[in-house]
Amino acid sequence: MRTTSNFDITQTAFLFSWISNSAVSLTGTETALAQEVESKLKKALSTFGTQLGGGSSGWQITWGPGVFSLSSQGQSDQKSDNTAFVVYNDSLDMYVVAIAGTNPKSTLDFLVEDGEVDAIKDLVNWQGFDPLGAQPTSTSANPKMAQISLSTATGLWALASQLQQVPDSPSTESLGEYLKNLNATNAKTQILFTGHSLGGALAPTLARWFKENSSFQGITTAMPIAGPTAGNATYQTGWNTKFLSSAAPGTINEGNIVNRLNYNVKCKQDLVPYAWSFIYKIQQLGSYADDLFYFKDSSRSDLYCNGTGQTIGLDSKMGTLVPGDTEKAIAIAAETNAFVADYASSLLINAFDCQFPMDYIDDNGNSQSFNPCGYSPCDVTTLQYCTPGEFETYFKELALVHVWSYGQDAFNIDFSVFQELSINV
């Protein structure tokens, strides 16, 4: 049975991460979008109350919510390209920093904060990088130095210094200043950074920056979900030494596989956690060879049909799948260069198989369920894609897996909870 109440701490943190995406389907000023997130967050705190991890004391907003829109940089966007808030529970003596993922409705968010991973020009040296300073600029790859992608650096800068808060935020500081000045009650005070997708790259990166630049003496952990790689192997090695496997506090509900922190929670059939360290390799190698993150057996080129029985050789590289000429060009350029930058993923991976049929809420707010054509729950290697519409429909199904598999299949939260939250992602 999936959880419908009495959520444990990792389920609670996931729900906060989910709520941080409340404004992705909307347009407006940064303040108005932040207020929408605040409204959804307060509703959730009221609706679920003591059912959230932490019990009777409840969770309180201590910073934000805040939103950054790329339109504030002179580009037409008016969307929530970065969103975050901080909540605190007195009983647990624990903070959660919830960070939104890529806004699927924002082309600029995709181009600037996901696509800038060119090994020739899109790297930023970690040492000396200050997200409270000027917007980051890039340098060329140097595997001997700890480097993060320009996409990650830009997102971190936006989070730390550019978020526009709601008028009634408990703090007037930027998120970066708030975190730098945050004091632990004692050595057992905890702060957990979490986010999904883009947020799954930014959350652990912000956690490292916090650990290296604040006077906080408590316990700092991260719970990245479906996170792409933030930087190169040298950077990731440094992260791994600072964030060891850590048991999640409290009792974890049955069926929730996320019982340890500092792991990247990864659905094997989701393409995003493979970016950028594996997604663009010509062949899937080693322990990743059997992970069908495109619903595709990498040893076969004729797994797909177009509904008429005619097989087509579908390239497993994402650049061929992305609809839209501009986005496709960005993805193809990235897959040409990303490998050179030596992007590396975390050593700690909490992987699972997503389950079908999968429930989701469509753009009109209606509950739906989808089951990819030819799927057999007992043998994912027989999965065939044979829905007319080809790449666009296929890409949509990949997106549904990326968004909807985690809450239900990893954290074991019942779909009714997401219906109650009523957030259009």
Image (cartoon, grey):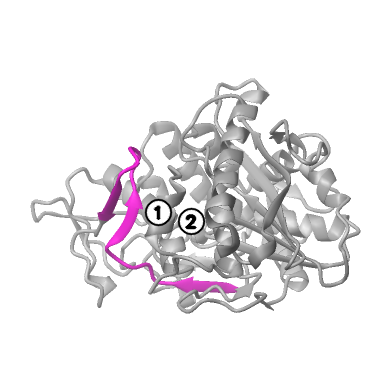
- Residue 391 belongs to magenta span: no
Which residue is tagged 1? Answer: 317
The reply, left or right, for residue 166 in relation to residue 215 is left
Circle 2 crowding by C-alpha within 10 Å: few under 14, some 14–19, many from 20: many
Q: Residue 91: horizontal and vertical position, in percent?
A: 73, 67
Residue type at mark 2: give it.
Answer: Val
Task: Give the quarter of the image for residue 121.
Answer: top right
The reply, left or right, for residue 185 in relation to residue 55 is right
Residue type at mark 1: give it.
Answer: Lys
The reply, left or right, for residue 6 in relation to residue 303 is right
Q: Residue 321: horizontal and vertical position, in percent?
A: 35, 46
The image quadrant where one finds the C terminus is: top left
Rendered residue at 17%/46% (across/down):
388
Which residue is tagged 2? Answer: 272
- Residue 368 belongs to magenta span: yes
Circle 1 crowding by C-alpha within 10 Å: few under 14, some 14–19, many from 20: some
